[in-house]
């Protein structure tokens, strides 16, 4: 993973531990496939779409203790896999914790996943609009 990501040692070990579902010290083909899909979605900047389309396996991946909820610590420690960073993570977590129990259940996580899609679409629209503006400025100056 060092060769294909910018993850540090700590992040690589955490990713491995998350994917080692049966705590055997190895990962099987399904886990390897999940890792490759996550890395590809991140590389192509479609991680939010990946979260939405694969919300159940992503939820299970983030639920590191198997408690059927995601704690703030679990959410923050694994967010690097999906390019979710910064102080906004806490705000995002609490915004979708509708029950107020300091954990995200699957339904709350699914709402988060839907919001991710909306945010990704908004970012795409903003980039496209910015690109069009820069193109129109270039064409009017030449």
Image (cartoon, rainbow, N blue to C red):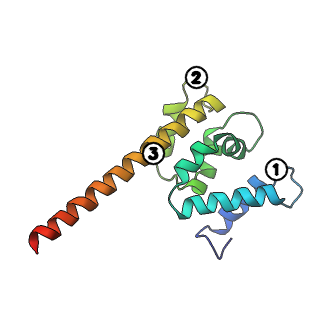
Residue labelled with disc 1: 21
Drawn side of residue 13 relative to residue 85, left or right: right
Drawn side of residue 33 relative to residue 126, left or right: right
Badges 1 and 3: C-beta atoms under 8 Å apart? no
Residue labelled with disc 3: 88
Where is 99 relative to 67, above or below?
A: above
- At horizontal 63% and vertical 57% (from top left) the residue drawn is 38
Residue 127 circle label? none
Q: Going by the picture, which residue comes out furthest to the right? A: 24
- At mark 3, the secondary structure is helix
Instruction: Evaluate whether residue 25 shows in this view.
Output: yes
- At mark 2, the secondary structure is loop
- At horizontal 67% and vertical 41% (from top left) the residue drawn is 59
Q: For residue 69, what is the image quadrant?
A: top right
Instruction: Evaluate whether residue 105 shows in this view.
Output: no
First in sequence: mark 1 or mark 2? 1
Residue 99 circle label? 2
* Residue 63 coordinates in the image, percent (x, y): 71, 41
- At horizontal 54% and vertical 48% (from top left) the residue drawn is 49
In three-dimensional space, the C-alpha distance between marks 1 and 3, rounded to whole angstroms, equals 29 Å
Where is 137 relative to 84, above or below?
A: below
Taking depth in this image into account, of 30 and 108 the one nearest to the observer is 30
In front of the other: label 1 or label 2?
A: 1
In three-dimensional space, the C-alpha distance between marks 3 and 2, rounded to whole angstroms, equals 20 Å
């Amino acid at each position: 993973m060092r060769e294909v990501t910018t993850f540090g040692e700590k992040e690589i070990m955490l990713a491995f531990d998350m994917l080692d579902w049966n705590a055997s010290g190895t990962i099987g083909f399904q886990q390897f496939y999940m890792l490759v899909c996550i890395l590809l979605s991140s590389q192509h900047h479609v991680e939010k779409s990946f979260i939405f389309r694969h919300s159940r396996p992503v939820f299970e991946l983030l639920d590191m203790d198997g408690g059927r909820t995601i704690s703030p610590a679990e959410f923050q420690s694994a967010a690097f896999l999906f390019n979710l960073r910064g102080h906004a993570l806490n705000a995002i977590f609490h915004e979708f914790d509708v029950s107020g129990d300091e954990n995200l259940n699957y339904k709350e996580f699914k709402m988060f996943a839907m919001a991710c899609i909306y945010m990704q679409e908004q970012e795409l629209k903003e980039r496209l609009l910015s690109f069009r503006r820069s193109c129109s400025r270039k064409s009017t100056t030449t």
